[in-house]
Amino acid sequence: MPVATTPDTGGVLDWSGSPLVPGEPEYTEHDEFWDGTRTYRLTHQDVRKRQGRLLTEAGVMVQNLVDCTPGSPLPGSKRTLSPAEHHRIVEAGTVRFVEPEGCLQRWESHDGTVLALLVGEVRSPRLG
């Protein structure tokens, strides 16, 4: 009988030195990003042109609400977008942020999976 397992963090720690938690996105101690199942390396810091290409190729999308996000109930929180939100963003082909500091980053895992990290509160398309 198969046994359900949680993703192995491989002993990697988060940015503060605490163990990573399966299912909870976080930055790692080695400047990588953990989506809750695997780690990614940053390939593009701020994608402003050709956002549609990144949004289409991304297998995972995570929103990181930075501390300065106005009205955020959980400043600094990170969450994986739902399939419906992911689809809405891909259909829009571009992301606009509330604050000028907002940006779209491209991260890639060792197995080739691409993660789109939305840093800041998204103005459009509307999420949630």
Image: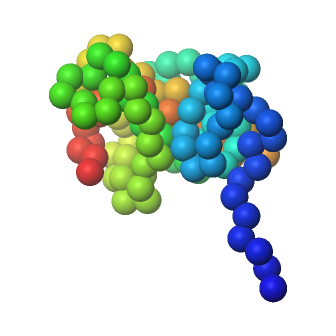
Query: Who's the residue at 37% across and 47% down the image?
Result: 89
Q: On the image, which quarter does residue 39 sit in?
A: top right
Can you name the residue that lies furthest to the left here?
71
Percent coordinates x, y for residue 127 in the rendering? 28, 46
Percent coordinates x, y for residue 93 in the rendering? 39, 42
Q: Is residue 76 left or right of residue 125?
A: right
In this view, 35 is above or below 119: below
Q: Quadrant of the N terminus?
A: bottom right
Q: On the image, which quarter does residue 73 sit in?
A: top left
> How many marks can you see?
0
Identify the image's colour scheme: rainbow, by chain, secondary structure or one colour: rainbow
Query: Who's the residue at 34% across and 19% down the image?
Result: 67
Percent coordinates x, y for residue 105 in the rendering? 52, 27
Query: Who's the residue at 20% across and 23% down the image?
Result: 70
Q: Is residue 43 visible?
A: no
Q: Nearer the viewer, residue 10 or 98?
A: 10
Q: Is residue 15 left or right of residue 82?
A: right
Percent coordinates x, y for residue 123 in the rendering? 23, 33
In this view, 119 is above or below 85: above
Q: On the image, which quarter does residue 84 sit in?
A: bottom left
Q: Is residue 2 visible?
A: yes
Q: Is residue 67 left or right of residue 64?
A: left
In this view, 2 is above or below 81: below
Can you name the residue that lies furthest to the front here?
18
